[in-house]
Image: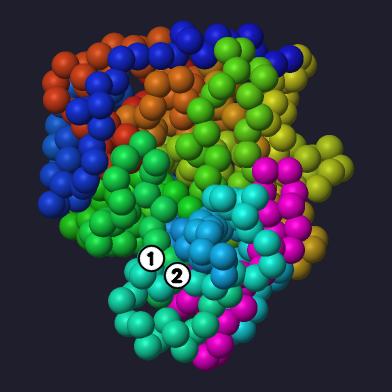
């Protein structure tokens, strides 16, 4: 049964001046709101390691943001903006970024009605200013097909560079639209976590932007196991909930990958319930694993978690360990060393967290699915927490400050 939730109940006043338009000079200088016992207090982010439970597992999303915004021009002069969402051919991320002359992407297109035939790159809208290199690439885009609100676009280029390198030279970093500014040179490094490894996101997992090498070392020194998953963040992360009833909101699908080795460690960790997710993307990945394991236990395939799957009337009686072990067994039976799947999971009040106990996350937009996720984790206390943040000078959204939260149901453990 879909929860009956009025999105207007998850609104709060966010003055424009409280939205952080640029990052701080030092990543770990940001503020940290600590809310692990129901009472919020302020700390500095660099103090985070000492606030974490020793011997826990901390899970990071190592996706890497791609310079996904490309600008082209028709021979008529019309400017076409192409926003690359995810690979279409080859569909595998690594294979697509390694191609050296042509590939196809699922894209959103600005000025779509004027996008006809083949268009040429606008070199003065590129990250690189080396006109000779850009001219040699001779990057062109052709509209192949329209699918609902997106398009399939074919890219062709010369010189034998990988498409990853082509995007690096020609693309623009897709900073959030609510920043209301052009991409700055600093965004190419600061709108990226220090541990980003796997190309594919069009939005940063912003909870990770605060972490420095020093903070990571101190976390390891507390005998905390640092692990990585990969969920490629899609443009849908910025989509507002437009319907008053959340049940009418459609979540976007996002791909993720976890290794068998990680799942084996997670299975052991579940005995102590000390799993710390860094960001909402890591949270959705971890919680999606439970339902993929349920698929395996019930004779299905661990390929996609549907949006409202967790909210069926009868619920699920499997333990988290049983579910994770079922995925491991599936991988063993199919000689796989990693699980590749997709999730449309929406986490709203009424959701039962199966894996995540602690969450490190930024402050999210009013009436957003991410704020609903926070409310599902800590209950109505989110209101006091956000009021505290507003009253104490915290900076909001992607380049804003951070928080450390503990699941409400875990407070009595």
Indicate the quadrant where residue 94 lies. Answer: bottom right
Numbered label attached to residue 308: none
Label 2 residue SS: loop
Where residue 166 appears, as percent x and y from the top left, is 48, 76
Give the CA separation, mark 1 to mark 2.
6 Å
Q: Quadrant of the N terminus?
A: top right
Where residue 193 appears, as percent x and y from the top left, is 33, 56
20 lies above or below 264: above
Where residue 336 appears, as percent x and y from the top left, is 71, 65
Q: Residue at x 51, y 28 (%)?
A: 240
Q: From which residue to which does the magenta span run? A: 141-168
Is 121 on the left-hand or right-hand side of 331? left
Disc 1 and disc 2 in contact, CB within 8 angstroms:
yes
Q: Residue at x 36, y 70 (%)?
A: 124
Depth order, front residue of 344/218: 344
Q: Is residue 265 visible?
A: no
- Which residue is disc 1 drawn over? 125
Where residue 244 appears, as percent x and y from the top left, is 58, 12
- Which residue is disc 2 drawn over? 122
Q: Is residue 157 visible?
A: yes
Colour basis: rainbow
Q: Residue at x 53, y 59 (%)?
A: 78
376 inside magenta stretch: no
């Amino acid at each position: 049964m879909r929860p009956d939730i009025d999105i207007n109940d998850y609104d709060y006043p966010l003055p424009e001046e409280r939205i952080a338009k640029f990052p701080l000079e030092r990543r770990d200088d940001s503020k940290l709101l600590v809310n692990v016992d129901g009472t919020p207090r302020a700390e500095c982010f660099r103090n985070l390691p000492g606030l974490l439970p020793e011997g826990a597992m901390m899970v990071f999303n190592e996706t890497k943001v791609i310079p996904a915004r490309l600008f082209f021009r028709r021979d008529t002069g019309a400017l076409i903006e192409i926003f690359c969402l995810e690979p279409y051919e080859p569909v595998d991320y690594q294979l697509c970024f390694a191609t050296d002359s042509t590939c196809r992407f699922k894209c959103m297109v600005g000025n779509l009605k004027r996008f006809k035939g083949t268009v040429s790159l606008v070199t003065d809208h590129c990250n690189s200013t080396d006109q000779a290199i850009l001219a040699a690439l001779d990057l062109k885009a052709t509209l192949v097909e329209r699918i609902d609100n997106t398009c399939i676009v074919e890219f062709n280029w010369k010189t034998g560079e990988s498409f990853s390198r082509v995007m690096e030279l020609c693309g623009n970093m897709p900073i959030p639209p609510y920043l209301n500014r052009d991409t700055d040179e600093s965004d190419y490094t600061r709108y990226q976590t220090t541990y980003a490894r796997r190309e594919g996101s069009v939005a940063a997992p912003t909870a990770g932007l605060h972490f420095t090498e020093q903070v990571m070392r101190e976390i390891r020194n507390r005998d905390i196991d640092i692990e990585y998953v990969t969920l490629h963040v899609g443009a849908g992360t910025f989509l507002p909930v437009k319907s008053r009833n959340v049940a009418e909101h459609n979540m976007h699908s996002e791909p993720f990958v976890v290794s068998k080795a990680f799942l084996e460690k997670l299975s052991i960790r579940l005995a102590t319930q000390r799993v710390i997710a860094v960001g909402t993307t890591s949270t959705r990945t971890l919680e999606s694993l439970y339902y993929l394991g349920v698929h395996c236990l019930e004779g299905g395939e661990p390929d996609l978690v549907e949006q409202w799957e967790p909210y069926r009337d009868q619920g699920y009686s499997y333990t988290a360990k049983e579910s994770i072990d079922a995925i491991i067994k599936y991988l063993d039976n199919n000689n796989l060393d990693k699980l590749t799947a997709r999730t449309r999971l929406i986490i709203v009040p009424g959701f039962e967290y199966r894996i995540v106990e602690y969450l490190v996350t930024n402050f999210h937009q009013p009436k957003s699915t991410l704020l609903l996720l926070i409310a599902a984790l800590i209950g109505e206390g989110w209101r006091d927490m956000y009021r505290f943040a507003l009253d104490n000078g915290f900076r909001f959204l992607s380049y804003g400050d951070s928080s450390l939260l503990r699941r409400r149901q875990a407070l009595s453990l």
